[in-house]
Image: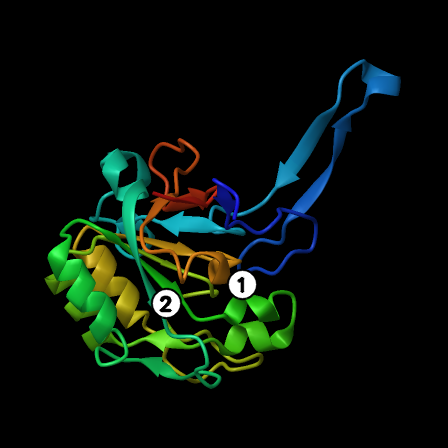
């Protein structure tokens, strides 16, 4: 087991994004043969790849990314192992009970939801991930959690391709962000941390003033 564990997806052209978000394009802007240096041109949305959502993502009156304390983005983490759920299954307070008990013993911890859904990254099945019920989100807030990280596209259900009628109001987002919390999405490789007895998680975003979120390099280590 390495000392540092990278839990981030690579940022590449054409990578999966949330339906309707800007496509990602990575291309050379300058090259050594032509310009003497290598520089990349990046085109991407603030919610691309492994990223964090600030409360402002949901409400103009809620805190923006640069208004959040840095401790929202790093600290001791409790891992909730909910792998094995069916497609689009709800993650309920009962499923989180073991993690909630550990969280109450260590207030201020980050919560990591290991769904196993990163195995479907790059496929249509990635959109059919399990999702956090509003009641589960409220239980996490009640346990003092202000940062939730997940190896899926969202903590809420993602619309099916072509779905234009269902109301996806992002209720779990609203509970967590409404409490001043941070949501990190599209982590990968969480099977590397589920069995560790003590984990630190780091989710520091780009310093984008007034932003709704930003890509992160999600990294964990055993402590």
Identity of the residue drawn at 54% across and 65% down: 118
Q: Nearer the viewer, residue 219 or 61?
A: 219
Distance from Cα at disc 1 to Cα at disc 2: 17 Å
The colour scheme applied to this rendered structure is rainbow
Which quadrant is the C terminus positioned in? top left
Q: Secondary structure at mark 2?
A: loop
Q: Residue at x 30, y 52 (%)?
A: 77
In the displayed structure, 53 sits above or below 19; it is above
Percent position of residue 216, x then y: 46, 42
The front one of 37 and 87 is: 87
Q: Using a 10 Å C-alpha cutoff, classify the residue at mark 1 as few (fewer than 14 neighbours), some (14 to 19) or many (20 or more).
A: few
Residue situated in front as seen by the camera: 171 or 138: 138
Q: Residue furthest top?
A: 36
| Residue 68 appearing in the image | no
Q: Which residue is mark 1?
A: 20
- Name the residue that disc number 2 marks: 155
- Residue 94 drawn above or below residue 99: below
131 vs 69, left or right, is right
Residue 146 relative to residue 155: left or right: left
Quadrant of residue 161 within the rendered picture: bottom right
Whether residue 93 is visible, yes or no, is yes
Instruction: Residue 111: give x, y in percent of width and height.
Output: 29, 58
């Amino acid at each position: 087991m390495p000392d540092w564990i990278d839990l981030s997806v690579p940022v590449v052209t054409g990578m999966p994004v949330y339906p309707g978000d800007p496509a990602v394009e990575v291309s050379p802007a300058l090259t050594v043969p032509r310009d003497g240096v290598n520089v990349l041109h990046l085109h991407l949305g603030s919610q691309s790849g492994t990223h964090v959502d600030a409360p402002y993502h949901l409400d103009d009156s809620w805190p923006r990314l640069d208004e959040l304390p840095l401790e929202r983005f790093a600290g001791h983490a409790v891992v909730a192992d909910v792998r094995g759920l069916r497609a689009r299954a709800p993650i309920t307070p009962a499923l989180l009970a073991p993690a909630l008990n550990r969280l109450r013993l260590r207030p201020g911890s980050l919560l990591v939801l290991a769904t196993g859904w990163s195995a479907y990254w790059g496929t249509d099945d990635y959109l059919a991930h399990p999702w956090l019920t509003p009641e589960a989100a409220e239980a996490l807030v009640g346990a003092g959690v202000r940062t939730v990280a997940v190896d899926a596209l969202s903590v809420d259900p993602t619309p099916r391709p072509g779905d234009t009628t269902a109301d996806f109001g992002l209720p779990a987002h609203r509970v967590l962000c409404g409490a001043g919390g941070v949501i990190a999405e599209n982590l990968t490789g969480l099977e590397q941390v589920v069995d560790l007895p003590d984990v630190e998680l780091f989710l520091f975003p780009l310093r984008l003033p007034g932003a709704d979120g930003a890509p992160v390099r999600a990294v964990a280590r055993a402590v």
